[in-house]
Image (cartoon, grey):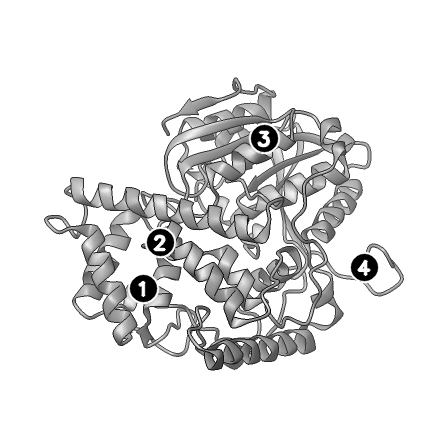
Amino acid sequence: MDHDHPNNGTVELGMVRLSAANSARLGVLFYNPGGPGDIASDYVLEATRGLPNFGQPVLENYDIIGFDPRGVGMSQPVRCNPDIYNERVSSFPRSEAEFQSLLVHNKALGKSCAELTGQLINHLDTVNVAKDMEIVRRALNDEGELSFLGRSYGSQVGLTYAELFPERVGRMALDGMVDHTQSETSTLHTEATTYEATLDQFFVWCNSTGNCALRGQDAAAVYESVIGSAETHPIPAPACNSTGDDACRSDVTGEEVRSNIQTLLLFQNETAGYTGWDFLATALGQAAAGNATLLSSPLATSDTFWAYPGLAIGCQDWLHTSTSLADLTYKISMAAAMAPHTRGSTQSYYYQTSCLGWPAPTTNPQRPFGQDTSRAPPILFVNALYDPATSIVWATELQRQFRNSVLLTRSGSGHTSYQLRGEAAAAIDAFLVEGILPQQATFVNS
């Protein structure tokens, strides 16, 4: 459980292995789909049912390892009290009373997670995940290198591994770059502005295509009208149930609309089980008419809800140093000035507020990578120009720190590119299977 004190307990890691179609395989390919908290084993199993989670060249030439990080999926998942998790508190407090309510809620939720999860709650950061991955690599192939495909948070896992074990890196492709080296304020600013820029692209698309449910209307005006209505009084979500796997809140606040739309922007077109922008347009249109079911936040219905690991891991990986209402008011004001539609409602801000009062220490805070990155072989970075979660600015900065890396940019919108099965995905497959890297500063359109 604790790599620094190996006698202090163990953690059981779970994974799924999908064997290569080609008997003359290249080896094993570790996969992390992101999150943190996304279940890699599920993505690998979905590929056996036809979802395009991997390209055919990869399926033919690698045994794919869907390795669930500690605290996730098959690897002793984080457990918390669902009733406490479902309490509605504002992450954008406007008064001292609201700020104190946020702290009380966070502490109660964190206490429940610690009690139900045990000591593992203190050992979930990404450094531990990378060290676990090295142990699994040795168990599978002691003399070999680690080939790796990481999307979103998976890029943070991959780069952490490359810093710790540079000589063990084989072919590594990272899609949707998370920069874990910036300051707390810079992290928030960059994610807020890339979310804002991608939302603006949605407005342009919606106002210029016949496929948008808001055609003939001003999409930005509809969005602001929904936010305004929800802030005045939560909009009902009449089709939501309070029980079952798809449970969701019975109404939706403006704060929740801004948060949930970041997720609905992830893919411009419906892809591999993810909804596209047409779904978001329909959701906004229905909300404007008084039904916000499609914008409602999910409710936890068990002590192993999918969102718990992401919070627990994030609280150990990301700084959250605000100590007062004034601290948060400063961040809120800054974000609103830079991103007036979305106002800073991001995953970064979620950690900077929801982790206040968390019981586990921040053991892996942001910092620049060390000089050992120069010992790693070339790594392929991929990022879209308009990504609502991982900014092209982050990708560019990480390419500067990993001098041997190559950055491929997709001229388009959406979060990650591999599952789109376009030119970017072909470049990833070519690198993983044939070792062919694109030229530095290459742009593709799909």
Task: Classify mark 4: helix, strand or loop.
Answer: loop
Q: Which mark is residue 2?
A: 4
Quadrant position of residue 210: top left
Lower sequence index among marks 4 and 1: 4
220 sits to left or right of 138: left
Q: Residue at x 47, y 36 (%)?
A: 392
Name the residue furthest right. 7
Q: Please report contact status of discs 4 and 1: CB closer than 8 Å, yes or no.
A: no
Viewer-closest of 66 and 417: 417
Q: Is residue 228 above or below residue 319?
A: below
Residue occupied by mark 2 = 264
Question: CA separation, marks 1 and 3?
Answer: 36 Å
Q: Is residue 152 above or below residue 60?
A: below
Question: CA separation, marks 2 and 4?
Answer: 37 Å
Question: CA separation, marks 2 and 1?
Answer: 9 Å
Instruction: Sort mark 3 into few (<14), some (14-19) or many (20+) by Cα contacts within 10 Å.
Output: some
